[in-house]
Amino acid sequence: ISDFESKGIRLILVDLGETAEEVQGYMDKNKIPFNAVLDQESSLADPYQIIGVPTFIFINEAGVVTAMTTATASTASST
């Protein structure tokens, strides 16, 4: 976390389509030390063209999307 912060990068987790209880249970089980924003209606999927999770969206200081990538099963399991 401190590596990101030292570079001026803020990490925001957004969960699509799950309840607060589901998300909190997953985060507790996996010891994820971040807060998550809930999008229970998955309203961000279309505007950001999210077709898989996890999807990483990089937004610059001006609020412009500069890059986007979706992790594959092999990259997600190695983290």
Image (cartoon, rainbow, N blue to C red):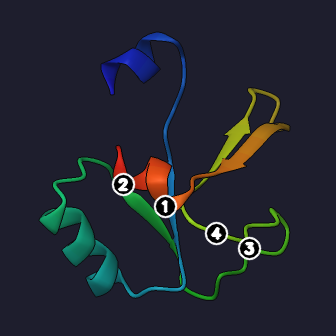
Q: In this view, does 33 lie to the left or right of 65?
A: left
Q: What residue type is labelled 1?
A: Ala
Task: Confirm or deny contact between disc 4 and disc 2 (CB under 8 A).
Answer: no
Disc 4 crowd, CA 10 A, few/some/many (<14, 14-19, 20+)? few
Q: Which amino acid does label 4 sit on?
A: Gly
Q: Name the residue under label 2.
A: 77
Task: Confirm or deny contact between disc 1 and disc 4 (CB under 8 A).
Answer: no
Image quarter where the N terminus lies is top left
- The label number, if any, that marks residue 73 in the structure image: 1
Tell me which residue sits at (78%, 37%) in the image.
67
Q: What residue type is labelled 2?
A: Ser
Q: Mark 4 points at which residue?
A: 52
State the CA–CA distance, disc 4 to disc 2: 14 Å
State the CA–CA distance, disc 3 to disc 1: 19 Å
- Viewer-side label of 3, 2: 2
Provide residue 40's location: percent of width, then percent of height.
54, 85
State the CA–CA distance, disc 3 to disc 2: 22 Å
- In the foreground, 76 or 13: 76
Instruction: Work out whether mark 4 precedes mark 2 in sequence or the reverse, and give the earlier one.
Output: 4
Q: What element carries label 4?
A: loop
State the CA–CA distance, disc 1 to disc 4: 10 Å
Tell me which residue sits at (47%, 48%) in the image.
75
Tell me which residue sits at (24%, 64%) in the image.
27
Task: Confirm or deny contact between disc 1 and disc 2 (CB under 8 A).
Answer: yes
Q: Name the residue under label 3.
A: 45
Instruction: Work out whether mark 3 precedes mark 1 in sequence or the reverse, and give the earlier one.
Output: 3
